[in-house]
């Protein structure tokens, strides 16, 4: 794999803290299906959690999630799905 130079994400737009590069998970809803893209390089604010993804990374993600063959071959994860319940939330 080709190593790319560390990208400078600059400062957080919200709180001005220096962004740190991390691999994150991003989730997308595509035609009613939840798709998780793992190990996405992104700038993450250590203070408020704001995330920034580079434009070219965003383009690559768009390509990945368009590829229905790739999606079909990907491992499945199960996630909890809970119903919105005002009674429970009042605790
Ligand atoms: Zn921040």
Image (cartoon, rainbow, N blue to C red):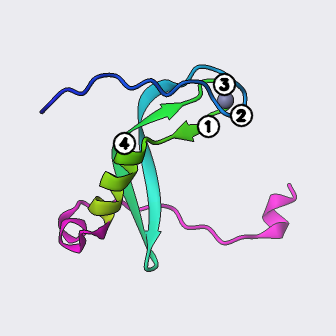
The N terminus - image quarter: top left
For disc 3, the marked residue is 47
Comparing labels 2 and 3, the label whose residue is closer to the camera? 2
For disc 2, the marked residue is 14
- Frontmost residue, 91 versus 75: 75
Q: Residue at x 43, y 41 (%)?
A: 54
Q: Do labels 4 and 3 touch, CB within 8 Å? A: no
Q: Could one spot residue 76 in this view of the protein?
A: no
For disc 4, the marked residue is 40
Q: Is residue 13 left or right of residue 68?
A: right
Q: Say if the magenta span includes residue 87.
A: yes
Q: Residue at x 66, y 72 (%)?
A: 83
Q: Is residue 4 left or right of residue 31?
A: left
Q: Could one spot residue 20 in this view of the protein?
A: yes
Query: Which numbered tag is attached to residue 50?
Result: 1
Q: Is mark 1 within 8 Å of ligand 1?
A: yes
- Frontmost residue, 37 versus 62: 62
Q: Residue furthest right?
A: 90
- Frontmost residue, 65 versus 84: 65
- Frontmost residue, 30 versus 5: 5
Q: Do labels 2 and 1 touch, CB within 8 Å? A: yes
């Amino acid at each position: 794999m080709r190593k790319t130079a560390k990208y400078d994400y600059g400062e957080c737009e919200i709180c001005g803290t220096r962004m740190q590069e991390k691999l994150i998970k991003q989730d997308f809803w595509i035609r009613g299906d939840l798709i998780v893209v793992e190990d996405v390089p992104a700038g993450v604010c250590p203070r408020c959690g704001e995330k920034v993804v580079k434009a070219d990374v965003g383009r690559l993600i768009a390509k990945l999630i368009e590829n229905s063959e790739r999606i079909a071959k990907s491992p499945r994860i199960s996630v909890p799905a809970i119903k919105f319940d005002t009674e429970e939330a009042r605790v």
